[in-house]
Image (cartoon, rainbow, N blue to C red):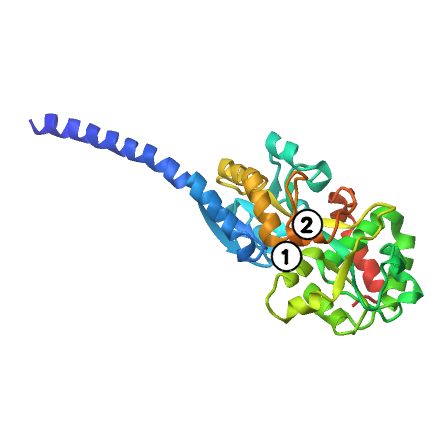
């Protein structure tokens, strides 16, 4: 009697365990781990929107771009990260070269994101566009005096230019774009002329360059426009400083103004691959792209999404369509030339 009683009980227990396991599997899979080099305020609201709509829990780890890449390399196949979000195509290229990203197969992403704003190997995609423009003091520079990045090496700009250090990836990518356009010899000569025109040794971030120009320490700065846009929407003294300056779009008769991206890649170690691809597709959606434009003052990756009023006031411009993969390919040479030219 006990045998007959124990057997069906064991069978029922096994059945119950199988049901629980079946129910638990999707619950465990309904999560996603994100490593992000973006400030939390600039990405978490979008991740929260995705979680609310999809039911997927997004676990966010933020840090410096280079530190997160090192972490991914150290963790290897054991990394919990499913996706990497970072700024600048140069960093995405480094992640590609380090082998921590895998190819994403998504017709939706290929259709939404222009080919030059994504990896040639398909392992990273741009999420937003940032332009690195020339910004000048309204009271000391006439727009007719400006023309191109190359022209900033002219002696007429002696002690009139402020820019951040050569260790900054945005400047490295700008120089890499010059290498792609002109080669090493011409870029080397341009860098020497540019550095000779610095008004002061490079110090601080892009906002600091704007503040320096507003204070009369220099007349021209090279900055990402979203920094200027954020200052123009600030309620502090930064707004007053930013209002003293104006954007000039360089190289409009040539290759166009230098642009870069914030972007995303699927990690090699991704355990939640399907959820990760869905998140990346969401970040290219109309909702997410509109948020980028209105809140972050970055240019949408998709041309059919309106820019913020602040960016619209800066005017339309022709952007360089260089495949951003090349910014990473030329990074090492760019750094070497910057050092040789004395760009600290």
Q: Residues within 10 Å of mark 2 (few under 14, many from 20)?
A: some
**x then y, percent, for residue 100:** 61, 45
Above or below for 279 versus 311: above
Q: Which residue sits at x=58%, y=53%? A: 295
Q: Which residue sits at x=71%, y=65%? A: 243
Figure quadrant of the C terminus: bottom right
Q: Which residue is mark 2?
A: 94
Q: Which residue is mark 1?
A: 66
Instruction: Assign a secondary structure to mark 1.
Output: helix
Instruction: Assign a secondary structure to mark 2.
Output: helix
**x then y, percent, for residue 261:** 68, 48
Residue extending furthest toward the left: 1
Q: Earlier in the sequence, mark 2 or mark 1?
A: 1
User: Between 256 and 333, which is closer to the camera in this rendering?
Assistant: 256
> What is the CA distance from the residue labelled 2 to the residue labelled 1?
9 Å
Q: Which quarter of the picture shows residue 233? A: bottom right
Q: Badges 2 and 1: C-beta atoms under 8 Å apart?
A: yes
């Amino acid at each position: 009697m006990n045998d007959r009683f124990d057997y069906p009980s064991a069978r029922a227990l096994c059945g119950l365990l199988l049901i629980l396991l079946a129910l638990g599997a999707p619950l465990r899979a309904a999560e996603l781990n994100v490593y992000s080099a973006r400030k939390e305020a600039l990405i978490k609201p979008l991740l929260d929107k995705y979680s609310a709509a999809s039911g997927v829990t997004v676990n966010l780890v933020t840090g410096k771009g280079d530190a997160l890449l090192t972490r991914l390399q150290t963790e290897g196949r054991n990394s919990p990260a499913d996706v990497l979000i970072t700024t600048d195509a140069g960093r995405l290229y480094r992640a590609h070269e380090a082998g921590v990203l895998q190819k994403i197969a998504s017709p939706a992403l290929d259709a939404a994101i222009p080919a030059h704003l994504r990896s040639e190997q398909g392992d990273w995609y741009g999420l937003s566009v940032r332009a690195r423009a020339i910004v000048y003091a309204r009271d000391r520079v006439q727009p007719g005096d400006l023309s191109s990045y190359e022209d900033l090496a002219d002696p007429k700009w002696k002690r009139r230019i402020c820019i951040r250090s050569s260790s900054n990836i945005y400047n490295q990518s700008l120089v890499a774009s010059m290498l792609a356009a002109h080669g090493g010899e011409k870029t080397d000569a341009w860098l020497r002329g540019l550095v000779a025109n610095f008004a002061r040794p490079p110090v601080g971030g892009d906002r600091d360059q704007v503040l320096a120009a507003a204070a009369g320490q220099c007349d021209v700065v090279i900055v990402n426009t979203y920094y200027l846009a954020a200052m123009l929407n600030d309620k502090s003294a930064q707004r007053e400083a930013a209002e003293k300056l104006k954007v000039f779009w360089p190289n409009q008769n040539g290759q166009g103004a230098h642009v870069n991206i914030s972007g995303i890649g699927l990690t090699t170690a991704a355990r939640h691959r399907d959820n990760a691809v869905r998140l990346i597709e969401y970040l290219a959606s109309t909702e997410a792209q509109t948020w980028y434009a209105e809140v972050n003052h970055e240019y949408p990756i998709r041309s059919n999404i309106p820019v913020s009023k602040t960016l619209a006031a800066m005017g339309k411009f022709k952007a360089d369509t260089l495949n951003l993969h090349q910014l990473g390919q030329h990074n090492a040479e760019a750094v070497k030339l910057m050092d040789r030219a004395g760009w600290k």
